[in-house]
């Protein structure tokens, strides 16, 4: 029998292509012609009118001129009104200014246009002001962020001694004195800068630049001092930009002003400009770890993970104790799919900072993805040890425990996560899941309900509520919530699998079929999907289809006793007794107390005429004191063989 395809309905009759009958009242005839006598009367009347007009020619000329003027005015007013409606007030005013202002219609329209133009101009100015305020707020936020970064990243200036010959051979004494004073000011400014006295440093550098206007270093240091002095002040930032650009004009190979511009652009979220400046600074001075770190962060945000890895790797080579650079190197490797190398990078971060909880967490995540649940638990526990108030870490620890089958510890971890974040849909979902695993469906129900309440658009939240109800025997509610999960996400296979399973268990395999066929298509490697679909085919007496699905299920989970038993039933009903015997024997190897397998094996032996072996099996079964109904059935079959 051909398996029905899911989602196909009966075709509906359509009127498309059928011709419509014409309305008998309709006609294509021309309007009826008027009698000839009527036309003659009209002709005579026309001659009389022409005579009257000819008699009053002068009067007619004056009247026609006034009519023409009135027509032009009406046309101009109409055109001006059109421009007014389109918001083109300047065009409307050009037309109206050429008309007679004393005309009430002109004056009225002119007043309307002027009023609307004023309102439009006011709105435009307000919009510009709002945009400007928003821009300023964004700038202030960026500058405040930059200020915080700079507080945590103190930068030192080192003034290199000048070459032995800083002036021409014939330089005057005054010139040499000037150069010495410039150098002294640079040294003094550097000392003030390194001590955090940025205002004082700025003045020294500016004085040096005034004595030597071509000194790019003085300009660059002055720009950096303005930035450090008050990075949240737009005026200071603008001075830093101006002086840095002047320094670049004087010496394009100077790295520091590019670094300063990169910081400023970075703070204003101008990522492309910031990246450009950082790259130049890194090329001109490849030994500055802070520049490489800043560049790497921008490259990571831009999803240029290979470039980011290169920058962070260069950074840790220069500064092996740079904890954040090791961590970011690890994150770049994660994005590139290099888990083992990422773990090494995170461990390097831990070598510089033992209590770095994020590094423990990332190693735990990688190990969990690799199937090393024991390792994942160890590292998540250490992450929680150093960050006990992080609900995300607690949730992941609980999930690692769940993977290991340690449901009690998972329950404890999820409980701590919920204590910190009671309204988390994820934490409530997780707690409901572990409660169900622990056989506490009634305790799971309120957590499942809260997960659904907090994330009503989530298919998993509806699913877990359905699962809790199913475990409590509320099959109608379970069907309702599983159905809601499928509505929210038609490809959410757990809900499809369980929905099909419930319908099949209620003796409704036809309703179950389409859900399970969809589940198998969506999740072709799901044991549950193939197992449930195999059972549906078994109940529909489509035995070959059942054998196909149950065989696939066993390839995914070879130790599934019930699946192996049902496969034996399908083989038996399909007349494949040899395969059926093999299946029932496999069941008994997995579980020697699977009493029904003994009964069915004995029945097959009876069919084959092997009554002796059948009697032996039944005698042994009765001796094992199985359940009363099984023992009674075995005794009945044994009596028939005597």
Image (spheres, rainbow, N blue to C red):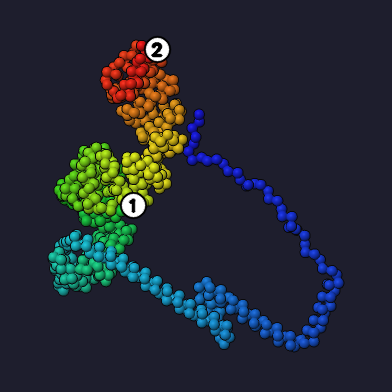
Q: Which residue is mark 1?
A: 453
- Please tell me which residue is depicted at 34% across the width and 15% down the height of the picture: 638
- Please tell me which residue is depicted at 31% across the width and 69% down the height of the picture: 136
Q: Residue 392 versus residue 263: which sits nearer the camera? A: 392
Expressed as whole percent of the image width and height from the top left, the position of residue 471 reads 32, 40
Expressed as whole percent of the image width and height from the top left, the position of residue 245 reads 28, 66
Mark 2 neighbour class, 10 Å CA radius: few under 14, some 14 to 19, many 20 or more: few
Q: Which residue is mark 2?
A: 609
- Please tell me which residue is depicted at 40% across the width and 71% down the height of the picture: 127
Q: Earlier in the sequence, mark 2 or mark 1?
A: 1
Tell me, yes or no, whether the two marked residues, 2 and 1, touch with CB atoms within 8 Å.
Answer: no
Q: Residue 418 versus residue 64: which sits nearer the camera? A: 418
- Please tell me which residue is depicted at 83% across the width and 72% down the height of the picture: 39
Considering only vertical position in the picture, is 623 above or below 323? above
Q: Residue 438 versus residue 252: which sits nearer the camera? A: 438
Expressed as whole percent of the image width and height from the top left, the position of residue 183 reads 16, 67
């Amino acid at each position: 029998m051909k398996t029905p395809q899911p989602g196909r309905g009966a075709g509906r009759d359509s009127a498309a292509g059928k011709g419509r009958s014409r309305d008998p009242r309709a006609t294509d005839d021309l309007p009826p012609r008027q009698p000839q006598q009527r036309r003659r009367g009209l002709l005579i009347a026309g001659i009389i009118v022409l005579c009257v007009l000819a008699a009053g020619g002068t009067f007619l000329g004056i009247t026609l001129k006034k009519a023409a003027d009135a027509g032009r005015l009406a046309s101009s007013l109409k055109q001006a009104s059109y421009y007014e409606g389109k918001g083109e007030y300047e065009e409307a005013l050009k037309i109206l200014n050429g008309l007679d202002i004393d005309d009430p219609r002109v004056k009225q329209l002119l007043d309307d246009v002027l009023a609307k133009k004023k309102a439009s101009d006011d709105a435009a100015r307000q919009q510009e002001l709002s945009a400007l305020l928003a821009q300023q707020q964004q700038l202030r936020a960026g500058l405040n962020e930059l200020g915080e970064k700079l507080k945590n990243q103190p930068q030192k200036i080192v003034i290199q001694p000048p070459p032995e010959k800083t002036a021409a051979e014939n330089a005057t004494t005054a010139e040499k004195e000037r150069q010495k004073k410039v150098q002294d000011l640079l040294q003094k400014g550097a000392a003030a800068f390194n001590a955090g006295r940025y205002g004082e440093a700025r003045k020294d550098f500016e004085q040096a630049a005034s004595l030597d206007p071509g000194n790019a270093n003085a300009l660059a240091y002055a720009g950096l001092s303005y930035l450090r002095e008050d990075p949240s002040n737009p005026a200071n930032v603008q001075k830093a930009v101006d002086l840095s650009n002047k320094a670049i004009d004087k010496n394009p190979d100077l790295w520091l002003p590019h670094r300063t511009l990169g910081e400023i652009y970075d703070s204003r979220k101008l990522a492309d400009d910031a990246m450009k400046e950082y790259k130049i600074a890194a090329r001109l001075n490849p030994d500055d770890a802070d520049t490489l770190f800043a560049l790497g962060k921008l490259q990571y945000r831009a999803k240029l993970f290979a470039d980011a890895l290169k920058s962070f790797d260069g950074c840790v080579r220069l500064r092996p104790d740079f904890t954040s650079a090791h961590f970011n190197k690890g994150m770049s490797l994660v994005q590139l799919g290099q888990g083992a190398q990422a773990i090494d990078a995170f461990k390097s971060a831990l070598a510089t900072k033992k209590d770095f909880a994020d590094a423990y967490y990332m190693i735990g995540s990688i190990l969990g993805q690799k199937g090393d649940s024991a390792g994942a638990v160890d590292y998540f526990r250490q992450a929680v040890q150093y960050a006990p108030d992080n609900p995300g870490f607690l949730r992941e620890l609980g999930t690692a425990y769940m993977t290991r089958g340690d449901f009690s510890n998972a329950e404890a971890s999820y409980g701590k996560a919920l204590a910190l974040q009671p309204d988390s849909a994820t934490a409530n979902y997780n707690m409901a899941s572990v409660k169900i695993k622990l056989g506490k469906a009634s305790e799971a129900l309120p957590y499942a309900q809260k997960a659904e309440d907090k994330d009503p658009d989530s298919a998993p939240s509806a699913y877990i509520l359905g699962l809790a109800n199913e475990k409590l025997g509320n099959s109608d509610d379970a069907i309702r919530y599983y159905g809601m999960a499928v509505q929210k996400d038609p490809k959410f296979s757990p809900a499809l699998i369980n929905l099909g399973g419930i319908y099949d268990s209620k003796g409704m395999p036809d309703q179950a079929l389409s859900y399970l066929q969809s589940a198998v298509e969506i999740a072709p490697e799901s044991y549950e999907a193939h197992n449930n679909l195999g059972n549906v085919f078994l109940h529909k007496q489509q035995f070959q289809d059942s054998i196909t699905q149950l065989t696939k299920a066993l390839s995914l989970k070879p130790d599934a006793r019930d699946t192996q038993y049902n496969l034996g039933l399908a083989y038996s009903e399909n007349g494949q007794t040899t395969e059926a015997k093999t299946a029932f024997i496999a069941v008994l190897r997995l579980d020697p107390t699977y009493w029904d397998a003994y009964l069915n094996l004995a029945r097959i032996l009876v069919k084959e005429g092997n009554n002796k072996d059948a009697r032996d099996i039944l005698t042994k079964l009765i001796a094992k004191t199985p359940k009363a109904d099984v023992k009674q059935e075995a005794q009945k079959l044994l009596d028939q063989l005597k």
